[in-house]
């Protein structure tokens, strides 16, 4: 990865269309943040089942905004009851007698609630796979303990009597499974390996990999052509080891509504929604990578804004096409805290875009992805935001007077577009109303530059440019600030 940048002038982006200098000068955007809080993201819990050890009782849990309660009958097997099937908004804990609080939050109706927020909801996230006493003996391949997917297993290795742990799960054909492993011991290492036991053969799918003390290891186990059993082998390399383990499929992966975990590999990436800003963080040593996903449509443009607010962060992009191998969308680049980066991605195939964030230290960051103006991006009628990249240029009408601001702190570049005819003269009138800061202006029609990197001094009013586009299409104006907040105005009219 490249080193942190002092500015944000190296964001990946699409074709330049004649204004390359201005696509490189991207910095911040004011966005409405739409995040989830722990108090408003719980799911109502069902009431079937007990505390995982005895049959439960009680009525059905309440549900708000989409959570689905479990049944009201006791679970004869004594296993934890099912909770809401989806995270509801402001879900309540299920009614009935309280069960065992296993993973944080309040357990409703004697069973597990749905997947609630980190400190709210019923049942909490993640759910526990069980304790160490329930897993032993699992010291040989033949004793491998069957574990559930998408739960947190916490256990220990204590050589020489317990130097090896084996776990197994049933793997479906064509599914990629992510293994998230954390060595929480401060002094001793551990080795992790995996085998796939298929209908006719046994294959090593993860060679023994050493995990240092107080560190994590997140990896993807390759999808197999047939269903079978995956066996994980954990082996102490010296003394006792405490560890945490989870296995997450790429189909139906669940995520914490507040932290978006687990999202440590591309296969378990947390989904993004266009236009919705997320606020999250990286917290080493356990969480040094975040992955987010967005459906990708071939040849469309998507614009992103990244603002690290506490500690720097690296951002890279990968395309997982519907068919074929993964390809890079853009190279990982470092951004320092307090800066803002703008960029665009242009997928070469249908599939899934992955945005990967990484850092060796702690980092807070905000991130949002927008569609292009051509694909329906709606701009603020007063500020014209978001319009910080070429393909999010705000549309304006011929003859309309536009007034806005630009600065180097959180809105360093603005783009506008207006339809023009070929070989017809137009007049662009621009005023820099700033007292101290200059504004640089550039313009193009199609891929042809018409006005290149022209500085407009402070207190310059009604400066005109006569342009005659050689092609019909969109006339795009880019404005880049060089100082504090600067008000400006512009208009484009047919001569």
Image: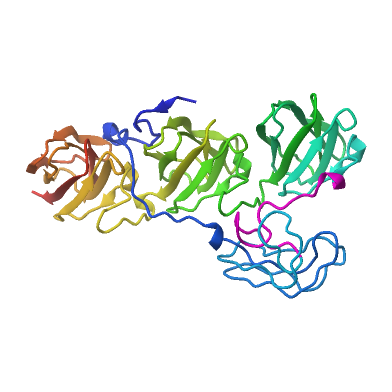
Relative height, residue 122 to residue 364 (above, below): below
Residue lying at the far bottom of the rendered structure: 59
| Residue plotted at (62% across, 68% down) | 92
Residue 291 image position (x, y, % from top left): 56, 41
Residue 116, magenta (yes or no)? yes
| Residue plotted at (61% across, 40% down) | 264
Q: Foreground residue, 52 or 492?
A: 52
Left or right: 91 as drawn, with respect to 103: left
Residue 139 image position (x, y, % from top left): 89, 35
Q: Foreground residue, 268 or 288?
A: 288
Residue 378, magenta (yes or no)? no
Residue 367 image position (x, y, % from top left): 44, 45
| Residue plotted at (42% across, 27% down) | 4
Q: Foreground residue, 492 or 113?
A: 113
| Main SS category, magenta section | loop
**Start and end of the magenta stretch?**
111-134
Let me know if residue 221 appears in the view.
Answer: no
Residue 225's image quarter? top right
Left or right: 345 as drawn, with respect to 470: right
Relative height, residue 188 to residue 267 (above, below): above
Residue 454 image position (x, y, % from top left): 16, 33
């Amino acid at each position: 990865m490249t080193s942190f940048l002092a500015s944000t002038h190296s964001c990946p982006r699409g074709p330049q269309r004649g204004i390359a200098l201005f696509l490189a000068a991207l910095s911040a955007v004011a966005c409405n943040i739409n995040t989830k809080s722990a108090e408003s993201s719980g799911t109502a819990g069902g009431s079937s089942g007990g505390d995982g050890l005895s049959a439960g009782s009680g009525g059905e849990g309440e549900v708000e905004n989409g959570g689905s309660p479990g049944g009201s009958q006791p679970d004869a097997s004594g296993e934890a009851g099912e909770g809401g099937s989806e995270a509801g908004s402001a879900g309540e804990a299920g009614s009935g007698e309280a069960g065992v609080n296993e993973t944080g939050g309040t357990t409703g109706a004697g069973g597990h609630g749905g997947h609630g927020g980190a400190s709210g909801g019923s049942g909490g996230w993640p759910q526990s796979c069980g304790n160490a006493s329930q897993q032993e003996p699992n010291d040989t391949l033949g004793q491998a303990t069957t574990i559930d997917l998408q739960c947190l297993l916490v256990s220990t290795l204590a050589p020489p009597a317990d130097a090896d742990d084996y776990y197994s799960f049933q793997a479906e054909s064509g599914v990629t499974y992510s293994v998230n492993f954390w060595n929480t011991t401060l002094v001793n290492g551990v080795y992790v390996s995996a085998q796939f036991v298929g209908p006719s053969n046994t294959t090593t799918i993860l060679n023994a990999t050493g995990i240092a003390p107080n560190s994590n290891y997140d990896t993807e186990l390759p999808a197999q052509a047939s269903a079978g059993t995956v066996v994980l082998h954990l082996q102490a390399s010296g003394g006792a080891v405490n560890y945490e383990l989870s296995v997450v499929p790429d189909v139906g992966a669940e995520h914490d509504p507040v932290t978006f975990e687990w999202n440590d590999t591309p296969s378990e990436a947390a989904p993004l929604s266009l236009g919705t800003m997320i606020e999250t963080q990286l917290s080493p040593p356990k969480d040094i990578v975040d992955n987010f996903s967005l459906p990708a449509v071939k040849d469309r443009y998507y614009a992103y804004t990244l603002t690290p607010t506490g500690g720097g962060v690296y951002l890279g992009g990968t395309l997982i096409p519907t068919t074929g191998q993964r390809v890079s969308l853009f190279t990982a680049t470092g951004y320092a805290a307090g800066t803002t980066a703008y960029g665009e991605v242009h997928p070469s195939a249908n599939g899934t875009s992955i945005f990967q964030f990484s850092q060796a230290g702690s980092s807070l960051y905000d991130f949002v992805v927008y569609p292009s103006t051509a694909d329906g991006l709606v701009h603020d009628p007063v500020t014209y935001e978001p319009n910080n990249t070429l393909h999010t240029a705000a549309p304006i009408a011929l003859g309309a007077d536009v007034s806005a601001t630009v600065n180097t702190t959180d809105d360093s570049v603005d783009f506008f577009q207006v339809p023009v005819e070929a070989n017809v003269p137009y007049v662009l009138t621009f005023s820099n109303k700033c007292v101290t800061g200059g504004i640089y202006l550039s313009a193009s029609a199609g891929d042809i530059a018409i006005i290149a990197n022209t500085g407009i001094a402070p207190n310059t009013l009604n400066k005109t440019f006569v342009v005659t586009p050689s092609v019909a299409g969109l006339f795009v104006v880019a404005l880049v600030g060089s100082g504090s907040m600067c008000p400006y105005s512009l208009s484009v009219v047919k001569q």
